[in-house]
Amino acid sequence: MRYAETGVIIEVDLSRGNIEKVETDPNLTRLHLGGQGTADKILWDRVPPEVEPFSPDNLLIFSTGLLHGTPVPGTNRVAVNTFSPQTNLHAHSLFGGWWGPELKHAG
């Protein structure tokens, strides 16, 4: 049984209008601890170094951490990761509120 995570990634392909629920490898979470670390690993593995920021091959990843949606203070931050059009480098931002817990509890 997996705790503190949903065990799935929702992949939304806006180019094709496709939504897919993909099971995750438990080792991905164990090694990268969810949220920011998992998003960084996915970008590293799936986006080629020569990708243009506005290319359909670039990813925009919204991720929540393992303690997201729990009563633990300071854990309800959503990480957004991509390659920036301004610098052509990895960029991330964090935001709070209720969107992240709703995303995580939606399964």
Image: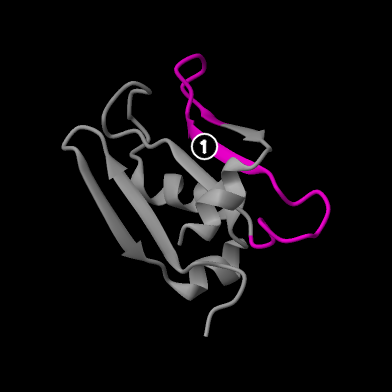
Task: Examine the rendered structure and indicate whether residue 53 appears above or below residue 2.
Answer: above
Which segment is the magenta one?
66-91
Q: Secondary structure at mark 1?
A: strand
Report whether 53 appears left or right of 104.
Answer: left
Camera-nearest residue between 77 and 47: 77
Q: Quadrant of residue 8?
A: bottom left
Is 5 on the left-hand or right-hand side of 11? right
Out of 57 and 19, give the one closest to the viewer.
Answer: 19
Seen at 74% across and 52% down, the residue is 75
Count of marks placed on residues = 1
Amino acid type for the residue under numbered disc 1: Asn
Residue 68 included in the magenta stretch of the image: yes
Q: Residue at x 50, y 42 (%)?
A: 62
Q: Quadrant of the C terminus?
A: bottom left
Closest to the observer, 93 or 4: 4
Instruction: Residue at 19% x, 38% y: name it.
Output: 17
For residue 92, above or below residue 74: above
What is the chief secondary structure element of the magenta stretch? loop
| Residue receiving disc 1 | 81
Q: Residue furthest right?
A: 73
Tell whether 51 sits left or right of 87.
left
Is residue 32 toward the left or the right of residue 75 in the image?
A: left
